[in-house]
Amino acid sequence: MTTITRNTNETQIELALDLYSDAGADIESPVPFLNHMLTLFARHAGVGLRVRATGDTEIDGHHTVEDIGITLGQAISGALGEKKGIARYGDALIPMDEALVLCALDISGRGHLSFDAAFPTQRVGAFDLELVEEFFTALVRSAGITLHLKQMAGKNSHHIAEACFKAFAHAFRKALEKTGDARVLSTKGVLE
């Protein structure tokens, strides 16, 4: 279990992550749609995730969403350590009703996001959908993951966002698979 605490003038976050536990999610933040996305991420990735977050949502959800992404990325990086013995790469093509999202990722040590999704609406409920990309940007930078998310189809904003999180979860789960090799999957011998 890796625990990260992040306290700023804008947010207070405590996050615990167990990469190889199907404990599910216990998420409490003032951003209900993100809570839903993190809950399904934990379930589909097969990880244990606990989040306690407060933030300046009276302004908007940006700081809270971004800082949870940063904290989750830090927890992933800390839990993986030297990244020895994992598959490193993962991919998934996930449908969510009419929506279809492709995800490919590399736990490379280098944070990069290629995000190609177009939401037909600006919001789902009170959640500003531009924060989906902000969340993943913060996560990959902190975790050192190269992540490609590409929407292949979709008309419903909720379904597109959910397909993004589920595709990431399934690709991440594949990348975490144990290879039986105690070395790092890199000719350099390190992933950074």
Image (spheres, rainbow, N blue to C red):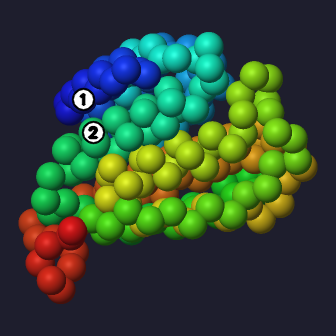
Name the element at disc 1: strand
Q: Residue shown at 72%/34% (left/top)?
A: 128
Mark 1 is on which residue type?
Ile
Rendering quarter of residue 50: top left
Give percent across and percent down for residue 78: 19, 44
- Residue 181 is at least partly visible in this image: no
Q: Residue shown at 30%/32% (left/top)?
A: 17
Give percent across and percent down for residue 187: 18, 86
Rendering quarter of residue 14: top left
Q: Give the number of callouts.
A: 2
Find the distance from the CA under tag 1 to the CA under tag 2.
6 Å
Between 143 and 1, the one lying in front of the other is: 143
**113 relative position to 120: left or right:** left
Q: Residue shown at 77%/65% (left/top)?
A: 152
Residue contact at pointers 1 and 2, CB within 8 angstroms: yes
- Find residue 75 and name its label: 2
When the figure is inspected, residue 137 is found, relative to residue 129, above or below; the finding is: below
The C terminus: image quadrant: bottom left
- Find residue 90 and name its label: none
Between 105 and 32, the one lying in front of the other is: 32
Mark 2 is on which residue type?
Ala
- Residue 191 is at least partly visible in this image: yes
When the figure is inspected, residue 136 is found, relative to residue 75, above or below; the finding is: below
Mark 1 or mark 2: name the one nearer the start of the chain.
Answer: 1
Name the element at disc 2: helix
| Residue on which the image places disc 1 | 4
Give percent across and percent down for residue 44: 51, 40
